[in-house]
Amino acid sequence: MLAVTYPQSPCTHLKFNLRNEALASVSYQSSSGLLPNRFDRQGGNSKAFQRYKLNCRFARVKDPPSPNLDTVKREPHKYFDQVIITVRSGDGGHGTVLSIPNQRTPSKSQGKHGKEKARKKISFKRDYDGSLILPMGGHGGDVVIYADEGKDTLLEFHKNSRYNAKRGGNVSAMGVLTSRLQNGLAAPTLRIPVPLGTVVRRKHGGFMADLAQPGDEILVARGGQGGISLIEMPAHGRKEVTALTTNVMRDESDKVLTFGQQGVEVSLELILRVVADVGLIGLPNAGKSTLLAAITLAKPDIADYPFTTLMPNLGRLGGDPSLGAGKYFSEATLADLPGLIEGAHLGKGLGRNFLRHLRRTRLLVHVVDATAENPVGDYRTVREELRMYNPEYLERPYIVVLNKIDIPEATDRLPSLTQEILRIGRDKTSSGDAVQALSAGVDHADVSGFSEEDKKVKEIEDYPRPFAVVGASVLKGIGTKEMLEEIRAALRICRDSYEPLAP
Ligand SMILES: Nc1nc2c(ncn2[C@@H]2O[C@H](COP(=O)(O)OP(=O)(O)OP(=O)(O)O)[C@@H](O)[C@H]2O)c(=O)[nH]1
Ligand SMILES: [Mg+2]
């Protein structure tokens, strides 16, 4: 079934079956009214969308509208970071059947020159052991997938999901064996570039490769071998076809074939895991994209509605001048991820799809909107989502940015919010992991005097406290310098404690 969207009415989805008959037209609004059209189009895993999907399977439109195909555009696939492609390596080129040319014995009358001429005629290509070398069909093209720094997304694979390598060339000559016969041309390798951090898996099989570094590559389909050539020899008054090698293909009647081997077709799943040093997380609208735009050259979409960011944006942080040029930490990559909401680990919002991008990050920057109704509750929600998705993410060093402190209401709350957040999580003296090294360097606020309720929550919230909590307005540039210093300091420590990064 093909889902199409009319550009004029972004909330309308028309379902078509393969014969292009419309099955139903659906229009819906989110109940909260919060979700913008862009989310509606992309957020197919929202409950509302799934319910409608089920309903519309049974609904048939009596008079299917005949859409003007020029105005219909395919809805972009929501899983931009996951795609299935089919690749096929090239078939091998064919060999041929050749006959030995007539080699008349020179007569005595031809003299010395005649004998030499006749000898030249039979100087075919021979192997080291003297056996004849017959030309082979060209090797079919292999298919290789490689990591390319110039690629950012897998989107193009949704438009083109089939890749065929070329077949090898046939042996061009037919007929008589000569010394000049060439092998068929080998087909070039089909090289498919993918972004760094792409994992290649067989569709119905296992893991094949993790293309994390520039130049990483994997041969996913080997081209077919070129067909061999046969030689026709006169034997007992009739001609018999003989293969000069034992490595031959035979048909059902045991006849030796000169056909090249067929290429192979494989379906592959490509999964993009963003490779970044720092992952920006937080609820929708917290200001993650604004933060990225403030400290890097990236230009992500920013808007005052949730789910503005639909796919991760990457930005590069300039080198730390205090370390000097050429020092081991000169820059870091930041990934701004779509906002997480409660239930993200179950696939709500856009969350689950993107949570896996955190896997390759060393440091998390958790952005909290300090003007929100309950910033500490929001903070907890996101921590809880991380825990539900993968408890290891909770152990990852992180910094909390209390954002939007340009608004007076947030400025007033900043000290109390900072205190509250610093009280959540594992005590710096409790046994821990490498993150403890980070916590040890932090001058945490006074955490004595927990209430009973706090103590209970602490049991669940058994994760390290943030490396730092900073107040900032990334929009107005307030506190961004301090925030950057904290990010850099944390990254320096991460580099020391977490080499090499787990794949
Ligand atoms: N007053 C104020 N507004 C801010 C600040 N930072 C961001 N905003 C505003 O908050 C809104 C959301 O900002 P985004 O950067 O798009 O938020 P986001 O976290 O990337 O949102 P999603 O992509 O939806 O997850 C925009 O209108 C920003 O202008 C800030 O420091 N102060
Ligand atoms: Mg954003």
Image: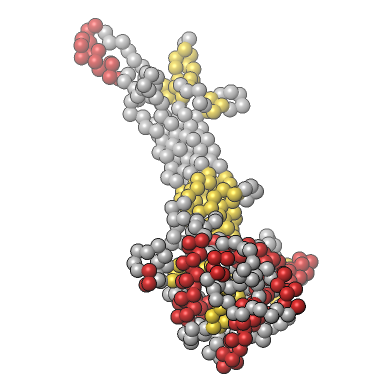
Q: List the single residue furthest toward the top.
A: 108
Q: How is the image coloured?
A: secondary structure
Q: How many marks?
A: 0
Residue at position x 61%, y 70% in the image: 428
Image quadrant of residue 137?
top left
Image quarter hosting the C terminus = bottom right
Residue at the bottom extreme, as displayed = 408
Furthest residue toward left? 112
Q: Is residue 73 left or right of residue 454?
A: left
Q: Check the image and report above or below for 37 versus 100.
A: below
Can you say which quadrant of the picture contains the N terminus? bottom right
User: Which residue is at 56% across, 90% downward?
Assistant: 411
Question: Is any atom of residue 376 visible in this view?
Answer: yes
Residue 328 position, x and y percent, is 40, 62
Q: Can residue 314 be seen in the rendering of this structure?
A: no
Quarter-of-image position of residue 345: bottom right
**For residue 329, side relative to residue 204 (left or right):** left
Q: Nearer the viewer, residue 471 or 232?
A: 471
Q: Position of residue 314 (x, y in %)?
A: 49, 69
Residue at image x 72%, y 69%? 460
Residue nearest the viewer, comparing 328 with 40: 328
**Residue 103 as seen in the image, left or right of residue 336:** left
Q: Position of residue 64 (x, y in %)?
A: 71, 70
**Foreground pick, 188 / 297:** 297
From the viewer's side, name the closer residue of 334 and 376: 376
Would you identify the image quadrant in which residue 413 lies? bottom right
Q: Residue at x 46, y 31 (%)?
A: 95
In x, y percent, where is residue 39?
63, 75
